[in-house]
Amino acid sequence: FASFKDGDNQFLETRIRRLDGALLPEETASIVGEDGAQSMVDAFGVMSEIGKDIVRIATAASSVEADAFVTAGSVVSPEEGSPSIAGLSFEEVSVSGIADEEGDPSEDDIKLAEILASDAAILLTEEIMDDGKPLLDAEIEHDEGPVSMSPHRMCRYSNNNDRKKASEIFGAHTDTSFVTMVPAAKVSGLEVFDEDSLQWYRPELNARKHAKGLDPRGDKDEQFPWHCRYLIVMPGELLQLTSRNNVPAAVHRVVATADAPRLSAPVLLRARPGTRMDVGRYMGSLERAGGLLGESDGMKMEEIHDALQPSPKQ
């Protein structure tokens, strides 16, 4: 638990215990009740799976765009014999991405590359992303520990010290996560910076507008309040890395008024401790990685996390 700005910002951070999926700290149940604690566990599981799907799609798409798994001549054409992967194991494909001297890749080569990119992205989400589950029968080095490193936070933002209509109470930043999953709050206040329009965008206001369009009279609100039907997904710095900068980390902040506090329960899907970034295994050709992705090859995910943190002010 932490409290800042004379109590205007309050945070309770919970984690999942890998062995039995229990919510820690156990005292959380005294605040939200046993049913509430179980609901948080269930919500974490749902948001983790959604987040993993998003990261898988974005990472695979960036690998396909970079031709990271393309090798000319990797598929034998029907004219030469039965279609097959010409002796390529997954590990051998990790050095692909360089066109064979015999010619350009065929359509079958490209189709194979797309399959390999998808399979590699699945491996990344299952091995590297910390979904709170133990990593069983893994072929990779890992030392994940008994508790998940992906927090499920309970946040309370208020504005008791500033009577302005709205003011920033949690400054602009990006998250060192793959994705941050934010259930829409009843009181809007999350703002994401739109770099194209150079404006702050409020996803919860847009969600409310969308809900109003689907249910103008609010008939569903008694059973399912509008904000319970929406989930905000913000890309983090680790997804920016694995997507080769195609999906930039979302710059976001929180604003609040003195009218009502904003309650939020985000999940930050981070990396599994003790695992390493293996570009060849997860994203194909190291030669086509470039930039920070290439530099991160072989680094422990904790080292990448630390390297992405802002330097302390002098």
Image: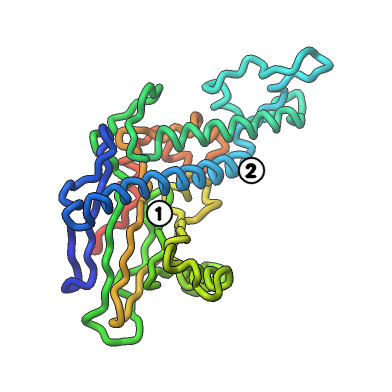
Q: Residue furthest right?
A: 79
Image quadrant in which the N terminus is located: bottom left
* Dot 1 crowding, Cα within 10 Å, few <14, some 14–19, many 20+: many
- Could you tell me which secondary element the residue under label 1 belongs to? strand
Residue at left offset 71%, top offset 28%? 109
140 up-or-down from 226: above or below: above
* Dot 2 crowding, Cα within 10 Å, few <14, some 14–19, many 20+: few
First in sequence, mark 2 or 1: give its number.
Answer: 2
Instruction: Report the residue marked by disc 2.
Output: 65
The numbered dot on residue 180 is 1
Give the amino acid type for the residue marked by disc 2 in the picture.
Glu
Give the amino acid type for the residue marked by disc 1 in the picture.
Thr
78 up-or-down from 272: above or below: above
Residue 94 figure quarter = top right
Image quadrant in which the C terminus is located: bottom left
Residue 310 figure quarter = bottom left
Residue at left offset 43%, top offset 51%? 179
* Cα distance between the residues tagged 2 and 1: 25 Å
- Could you tell me which secondary element the residue under label 2 belongs to? helix
For the residue pair 55 and 90, the one nearer the viewer reads as 55
Q: Position of residue 204 (x, y in %)?
A: 45, 69
Residue at left offset 64%, top offset 34%? 114
Q: Is residue 286 visible?
A: no
For the residue pair 205 and 242, the one nearer the viewer reads as 205
Q: Is residue 167 left or right of residue 209?
A: left
Q: Residue furthest top?
A: 81
Q: Is residue 92 left or right of residue 310?
A: right
Q: Position of residue 184 (x, y in %)?
A: 42, 63
Residue at left offset 24%, top offset 45%? 23
Q: Position of residue 5 (x, y in %)?
A: 19, 72
